[in-house]
Amino acid sequence: MKKLLSIVLLMGLSSLSYAGGEHSMSDGNHNHASSAKASAGVHFYGRLYVGYDKTSGTVQRLDDGGNKSRLGLKIRSGNIIGNLEYKFDIGDGDAGNNCGANNSNECGTFDMHVGNLGFMTPLGYIGAGTFEAPYKTMGQFDTNMDTAIALNSHGGFSQGQGGIAGNFESAVAYHAMMGPIELGFMYAASDNTATDNSNTDRGDYSLGITFKDMIMSGLTFGYATYNDNEVSGGDSESNDKFFASYKAMPNMGVFVSLEDLDVANTFITSSNINGEIKTFGIHYTMGTADIQLVTAEGESDGAANQDYNTRSISAKINLSKHSDITIGYTKQDFDQDGTDISTSGLGLTHKF
């Protein structure tokens, strides 16, 4: 019944979308997808992804392990702006990979990614709902985000709710572009105080600021933070990130991300260990291929066996303006007796 209701809902929403208009979608790494025609102020867009991947020599699957596929609506009427976006897996038909008796919420066909409504004012956007936090969207350089070879799944970036992949729920949000400066702020207005560290609770906040082409052409840099109240009765913790990118040549850019992580489960999943992640990478365009090379180092504040190095190489081969094939390999290599994680993958993407 849950799957049926989800399908009916999305069919109803998509039926609004074929009468006129244009839209582009931006994901965490600022890739854009064109939209179908929509009725006045209503724009339908999406992205389909299916991939094959093999992790640590034992797990093999043909599906969308990171739920990169998207189906969404963007609404603009006067100064009112809304966004409703669902993620799903066209490989196995589910929204998540943990279907089972204890994970019934992961077994739906669609899982909401973002949903929000607000006003565009002369001073910027003010809205409420579920968003991608500034900690995720600012300084997000991984072109493989939401795939099996994604850096955040292998220690190249932070993990979990307070990390690169986290959404910000029950939030009041502000976003503004002021010349070369981009500013974003979100504050959780949930009716729940800090009762766990897996969801957004009242008092949590995320703040980010980015400067682009301000000091020199081609240079972007900034800072973002994610503050979490943690468990009830405990002290709040925060993740902090400094990031920069520079277009060194017309076909090559370099980037750096420095994260100081204190929020639980963001340095290493299912762990209260804190740490730092230093990530350096190159984006290089060669013909129709966009190549990404990354090296990262994770230094734990706890056990020495949780220190690691991450290496990643991937290529996105553009088939057309809206379609591409991605192939890559990412490995997280722990220094001592930790469990190494390596993933190779191949995926096909189409945006519309």
Image: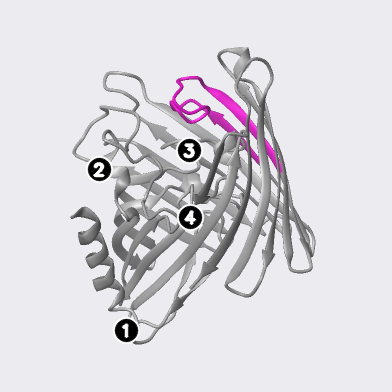
Q: Amino acid at mark 3?
A: Gly
User: Which residue corresponds to mark 4?
Assistant: 68
Dot 1 alpha-carbon crowd within 10 angstroms: few under 14, some 14 to 19, many 20 or more: some
SS class, disc 2: loop
Q: Is residue 217 at all visible to an observer of this figure?
A: no
**Residue 163 shows which numbered tag?**
3
Label 1–label 2 contact, CB within 8 A: no
Indicate the position of residue 214 as horizontal and vertical percent values.
66, 57
User: Which residue corresponds to mark 1?
Assistant: 40
User: Which residue corresponds to mark 2?
Assistant: 189
SS class, disc 3: loop
Q: Which residues are magenta?
A: 257-280
Q: Amino acid at mark 4?
A: Lys
**Residue 134 shows which numbered tag?**
none
SS class, disc 4: loop
Looking at the image, residue 40 lies above or below residue 252: below
Q: At x 52% / y 22%, what residue is drawn?
A: 274
Q: Amino acid at mark 2?
A: Ala
Indicate the position of residue 38 as horizontal and vertical percent values.
36, 81
Q: Earlier in the sequence, mark 4 or mark 2?
A: 4
Dot 3 alpha-carbon crowd within 10 angstroms: few under 14, some 14 to 19, many 20 or more: many
Side of 271 where 83 appears, left or right: left
Alpha carbon distance from label 1 to label 4: 28 Å
